[in-house]
Amino acid sequence: MRKLIAEGFVIFTSIIASFSVENYRESNEEKEILNDAVITLGDEIDSNILYTKEHLKQVRNMLYVTKETVDNFDNINLDEIFRIHSNNPYMHSIIENGEIEYIKKYQESYMIFVWSNAWEPENIFFKSMLNSGKLLEIKNKKLRREIESIYTKQEERVSGMAKLTGDVSANLILWFDNKQDSFNKDITITKVFNDHKNQKLKNILSRRKTNLEYRVKDIENYLQALQNVVLLISTEYKKLD
């Protein structure tokens, strides 16, 4: 009887031990999967930091050119605005490998006034973590909330201000088009701006300046939040060999 009890106890202990080992193994695997997911998200955020720094520079330059135009509105001409832009560029083309090439050769166009610069950060891996539930597995509430805030509230704020820049640009396009159409002969954009700018145009440019001031501040706050999250991730999560 004692032998049977002893054998039963050994079997029972072995089963419990095997379950414990299996649970431990699965727990470690889940931790490794989460670790890798957060590290990959950190890489995406690192990429967004580089993107945001370049974008911030562009919007700051856009603000500077607009401010110079408004502050010197009565006397400034289009060639002077082009020269200011050459030293503070924001109009650009995307060339090979996604590299940016700033435009410093100018055509007869009002694009320098209406360029708004799209806001397009990466969010593919964040959406993947959100949809898979991995985001909720992050135990550090501060880190989780910071990540959620960046990809929702702050990105929406920056995106909304970029859209508003586009709305103001639409009004600028309308002003230039209407002014050109008011003549019964061909007239260049250069002549329209240099000789026929008026208070209405100045008012629209002033609204653009105000919008860009807010936009710069929002992007600065967004960039700081990205850097804070990267620091938190690097403190708690390490790349596994």
Image (tube, helix red, strand yellow):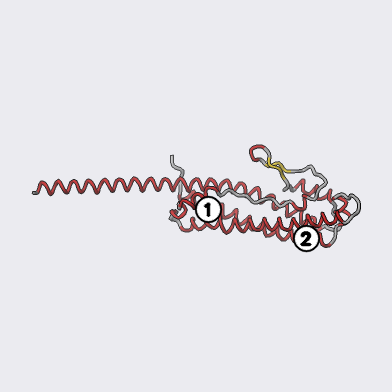
State how far apart marks 1 and 2 are (Cα).
37 Å
| Other-residue count near label 1 (Cα within 10 Å), few / some / many at <14 / 14–19 / ≥20 | many
Q: Amino acid at mark 1?
A: Val
Quadrant that contains the C terminus = top left
x and y percentages locating residue 64 in the rendered image: 74, 54
Please identify the residue farthest to the right as the structure is shown. 185
Q: Quadrant of residue 206?
A: bottom right
Q: Secondary structure at mark 2?
A: helix
In this rendering, which labeled residue sits more in front, label 1 or label 2? 2
The numbered mark at residue 204 is 2
Pick whichever of labels 1 and 2 is earlier in the sequence. Answer: 2
Answer whether labels 1 and 2 touch (C-beta < 8 Å).
no
| Other-residue count near label 2 (Cα within 10 Å), few / some / many at <14 / 14–19 / ≥20 | some
Please identify the residue farthest to the top as the structure is shown. 96
Does residue 106 sit above or below 221 in this rendering? above
Q: Secondary structure at mark 1?
A: helix
Residue identifier under label 1: 229
The numbered mark at residue 192 is none
What's the residue at 85%, 56% (across, down)? 179
x and y percentages locating residue 172 in the rendered image: 78, 56
Q: Quadrant of residue 221?
A: bottom right
Q: Nearer the viewer, residue 201 or 102?
A: 201
Does residue 3 sit above or below 175 in this rendering? above
x and y percentages locating residue 103 in the rendered image: 75, 43
x and y percentages locating residue 154 in the rendered image: 59, 57
Q: How many marks?
A: 2
Q: Amino acid at mark 2?
A: Ile
Relative side of 154 to 103, left or right:
left
What's the residue at 8%, 49% (across, down)? 1
